[in-house]
Image (cartoon, coloured by chain):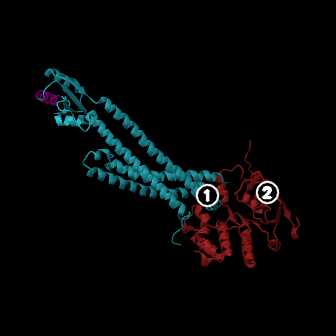
Amino acid sequence: MKRESPLLPESDAREAALFFVIGALCFLAALAALTTRGTYAAAAAWGDQIEGEVTVILEGTDRRIAAEVTGEIENLAGISQARLLSREEIEDLLAPSFGPGGLPEGLPVPMLIAVQVDMDTADPIPGIEIVLGEFGVAGEVGTHAGFAAHVQNALAVLRLVGFGAVGLLVATAIAVIAFATQAALLARRDIVNVLHLSGAEDRFIAALFARRFWGLATQAGTGGALGALMITALIVFLASSSAGAEAELLPRLSLDIWDILILFSTPVAAGLAARAAARLTVLRALKEVR
Amino acid sequence: MSRIRFDFEDNSAVRLDGVSLSYGKNEDILREVDLTLAQGSFSFLTGPSGAGKSTLLKLMYLALAPGRGDVCLFGRSTRLLKRRDLVGIRRRIGVVFQEFRLLNHLNAFENVALPLRVAGQKLASYQNEVEDLLRWVGLSERIGARPSELSGGEQQRVAIARALINKPDLLIADEPTGNVDPEMSRKILRLFMELNKRFGTTVVIATHDLGIVEEFNRPAYHIQQGRLRARRKGGAT
């Protein structure tokens, strides 16, 4: 004899359907995990950017003094850059409030200084206020703190929703596998009975089903993860080829080591879930026969 | 509190004490059945269809548990045994099922080798043994055939070989001659008797073929409407 046949018959149409379902669930779970991580990374970077920026609004002064104030602020410790915005830039910022007609001619607009703050150093705002006092300029320092708090709250919600979605998909996959195992067991009750009455231990029979479903789920999971990889690669490609603001709308997918880890762990997680579900289902079902 | 009984004097292979069984809330299929089969005995179980022969055998090969009473195998009560201990007892029992119960995706060789394989034995250790047994039942040319490629009689012989491969202490056969011609029936019965004589295997055969029971002249029990009676020569119970 060359080789023994497996004790469970080759897969049938039911298992082909299950293969598709597990593959689709793994695809969705991997994509949800990658998207959640990418979106979170993009939002976190945006949050950092907002938190690291301070706007100084100068009132009742001319552009020459404003430029001097800007230079002085840039020399302060903890300031990486200070830049006096041009009138055009300020008009662009205010344009949404004035509609398509733009700003009325002759309307006085404040001077704005965009300051990039070094996040690792102490609060630089008192230093900026001292500079304003030294120049005798009335001004206000805006930290975007309220806006940044909203962004942080949104990030927390986003993280919860992302984890929830991934968790729900994983739980669904496990439930589907458990139901499928029960169905396979019902369909193969005759085989289980013969094995049982031939002196097979419960764990031996459970191991047969666990191995079968481990193989099926890891293969299906690999297919799903490959699908997610292709979609991710497409998004990365679209993001890299879009130089404009629309690129900012795409999740920050990079296919770094963590993304690769998610893709590799998807079929393993699916396989482990299938193995455990199959084993438990079979053991429970066998407890009902003598 | 229940206590496990160790009966060191009991040399029976099978002992049923006041066994009754019903499926669900239906009427009892077996009623207060008492039966002792000594180790090394050879017995027939007769009775009309639906009388409870197969159910009685299922109790003996541990496919069912009694509703009331106790089933003792090889001197041990099975009532309080743990599942893993039942496995050990099952491996001492060979069963020829009425409907064969061969696995359709395995060939004749693999079906016969099944009890050894599930017990963890390796192919190399049982290959010759399985081939010898298949040759003995006249299937050496059909060793690689799947059940769907075998006739009813051939399937029956594979089922018998599977029951014998373990050299069981107790052989239970449910209508083992139901699908074979009279010549093969006698050959199978002679094989069972040889096993019984040479290895001391306890044999119990359920059959409705009273001609065979008369011809082989062994103790017989008759079951009717769930009640078991010893059957005397000439068919009286």
Q: Position of residue A55 (x, y in %)?
A: 23, 30
Q: State the residue in front, A121 or B228.
A: A121
User: On the rendered structure, is B105 left or right of B236?
Assistant: left
Q: Is residue A68 visible?
A: yes
Image disc number at residue A186: 1
Q: State the residue in front, B82 or A153.
A: A153
Residue lying at 34% horizontally and 35% vertically, measured from the top left: A151
Q: Main secondary structure of the magenta part?
A: helix
Residue lying at 50% horizontally and 53% vertically, measured from the top left: A274
Amino acid type at circle 1 is Leu
Q: Secondary structure at mark 1?
A: helix
Amino acid type at circle 2 is Ile
What chain is the cyan one?
A
Q: Position of residue B217 (x, y in %)?
A: 82, 71
Where B101 sits versus B141, above or below? above
Q: State the residue in front, A177 or B97.
A: A177
How far separated are the C-alphas under marks 2 and 1? 26 Å
Labelled pair 2, 1 in contact (Cβ < 8 Å): no
Discs 2 and 1 carry the same chain letter:
no
Determine which residue is flagged by label 2. Answer: B29
Report the span colored magenta. Answer: A64-76
Q: Colour of chain B?
A: red
Where B106 sits versus A18, above or below? below
Which quadrant of the figure has residue A39?
A: top left
Magenta span includes B58: no
Quarter of the picture containing the C terminus of chain A is bottom right
Image disc number at residue A126: none
Q: Position of residue A179 (x, y in %)?
A: 56, 52
User: On the rendered structure, is A146 left or right of A139?
Assistant: right
Circle 2 packing at 10 Å, graded few (<14), some (14-19), many (20+), is some
